[in-house]
Image (cartoon, rainbow, N blue to C red):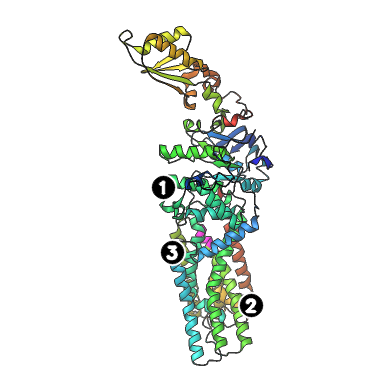
Amino acid sequence: MPQPETTAPAAPAAAPPPGSAPDVIHNIGYRHYDGPRLGRAYVRRSLFAQSLRGAYGLGRSARSKVLPMILVGVMCAPALVVVAVAVATKMNKLPLEYTGYAIYLQAVIGLYVASQAPQAVSTDLRFRTVTLYFSRPIERFDYVAAKYAALSAAVFLLNAVPLLILYVGALLAKMPIGAQTLGLAKGLVGTALMSLLLSGLGLVVAAATPRRGFGVAGIIALFTFSYAAVGTVQSIALMQDRTPITPWLGLLSPTTLLDGVQVWLLDVASAHAQEFAPTGAAVGAVGVLLLLGTVAGCFGLLMRRYRKVGLS
Amino acid sequence: MRRGGRPYGRSVTVIATESLTMRYPRVTALDRLTLDVAPGVVGLVGANGAGKSTLIKILLGLLPATEGRASVLGLDVATEGPGIRERVGYMPEHDCLPPDVTATEFVVHMARMSGLPPAAARERAADTLRHVGLYEERYRPVGGYSTGMKQRVKLAQALVHDPQLVLLDEPTNGLDPVGRDEMLGLIRRVWTDFGISVLVTSHLLGELERTCDHVVVVDGGRLLRSSSTADFTRTTASLAVEVTDSDRHPDGAAALLRALDGAGARARAEGRLLLVDMPDERVCDTVRDAVAGLGLGLVRMEQRRHGIAEVFRPGDADTPAATADPAGTGPAAPAGPDVSRKEGDGDAAA
């Protein structure tokens, strides 16, 4: 008979008899779970929700909430100032485009990605919690997709909230509602593209190392150096009168790439100075392909990264 | 309540492998391993690098074997990995807990990662943590836990989705003797109280004998021995006897040894102790009568099970347990897949 003997004195499933001492609680016995076991889609959603909350420090220690919340504040502050000025001076147009907001505040967004991408993946690697995920019904794709989507959503929210503040402020200042709504929609599309691009790059760097500090430094380096390098090389190209290549150089850093894509795809003004702007139909089309290719490439690299990691 | 109603509750085989081989470029981790493991607590013993962890990863369907076949709960590891991982719990050897979350949060999350709906996940996590012996401390971050408490959280996450089998990789690693005993007791309860079959690995032969119904010994990826613990500890059970000396018998132990020889009992001296082979209960009477006849004081008389380690000691080849001794049969002998337990045997060690 395969059924084991029970050592619990009472029938295990039975409730403890009334009036029994509180210590009897230990004798409730083991209860089996006969309820539903939901599939991979549920597991993916759960991991997505947990990671998204974690990206703002929710469900984590108080200390983990500090930096994300400060960055949210820093992201919203300029929008509030713009709105206040716009309402007070009765402007009929916002002093900046919705699509430009992320580019003006790219340092803040970069810092957010640099701090939260390692939190999303390095801790699981460092403390080897990934082993526990992959010993469950969850597959590599579920894990990578949930983490990528969660960080993208977190970055999206980080920029979407100030855009909404701008929009509400613009309506309060009685600016034309149609134009503002269109501007907001374009801004949100641009934000979505940016979120996918920056999250992908951030996660690839962060997942490469179980050391969180290396991840943070690597992401900051990637974002700032590429931006600075593109600006410098563009300046040199301008000085040497090689203007035709300056827009193409803009494809080489995430922020300028995004700018170029927004200019071409969404028909908005570049957030960069005229001579540096990655404009032109060919540049824009290549930029869109490059952006989508980068996102797909990042996903592929993450899938590759986790191929053996569950076995450690 | 018990597993009788479930499709796997009646399966006689929890784990079956057939010529399972795993070759890495430089090393053969598993070498034609054939096993047949029945429900219960099964110990997998081997030195570090004997292939235990490799076997577990293959059984979880995470690592494709080079050759051979294996099934867990009737599911093929090569094709039905997700199904296996839904029904099996795994406690890794290494640390796997993030330090900045509480045990409750962590186990709830892991329950959801096994597909349990949110409310059920919370309820199961609370239950499971209580069963492994974590009470108020489960609301504190795991980073501040002792090794013993961390091991309990690791066990809880392996049990939280109510699996039909748990694979425990070196669960007593790093624990002090008391913590080790508690963990082994807990593992025993996973089967006796929870009805969940257990495969537990260890590099210490001795600690598994009290816990396991069966022990599988692997070395260099090969099956060295596989049989019921009761089989080879019971046959070597002995009675430890200590007596006083008297004026007539200045060496009481030696006098008793002679007397027992005369009475037909096999005994040997070990310091001041006499170890009397104990094929059955009547030996106790023989010893009592012999001691009384000599007029000695009986200081102690206790039944002692030989450790598995003793059974495997080469010097013991001449004891009556020689049939159960691999030193005699040797690793070259075709150790058969002999783990299948006798009906009703499961309660013997409980």
The subunit letter for the residue under badge 3 reads A
Q: Is residue A58 magenta?
A: no
Give the Cα distance between marks 2 and 1: 57 Å
Residue B146: which numbered mark, if any?
Answer: 1
Quick one: SS at disc 3?
A: helix
Residue A265: which numbered mark, if any?
Answer: 2
Q: From the viewer's perspective, is the residue at label 2 or at label 1 nearer?
A: 1
Query: Which amino acid does the dot numbered 1 rest on?
Result: Ser
Give the Cα distance between marks 2 and 3: 41 Å
Quick one: SS at disc 2?
A: helix
Instruction: Decide whether the magenta segment is chiefly helix, strand or loop.
Output: helix
Dot 1 crowding, Cα within 10 Å, few <14, some 14–19, many 20+: few
Measured along the vertical axis of the image, is residue A231 above or below residue B144?
A: below
Percent x, y of residue B150: 46, 47
Observer-nearest residue: A18 or A90? A18
Residue A62: which numbered mark, if any?
Answer: 3
Discs 2, 3: same chain: yes
Discs 3, 1: same chain: no
Q: Is residue B28 visible?
A: yes
Along the polypeptide, which appears first: circle 2 or circle 3?
3
Q: Which residues are magenta?
A: A203-207
Q: Is residue B73 visible?
A: no
Residue A20: which numbered mark, if any?
Answer: none
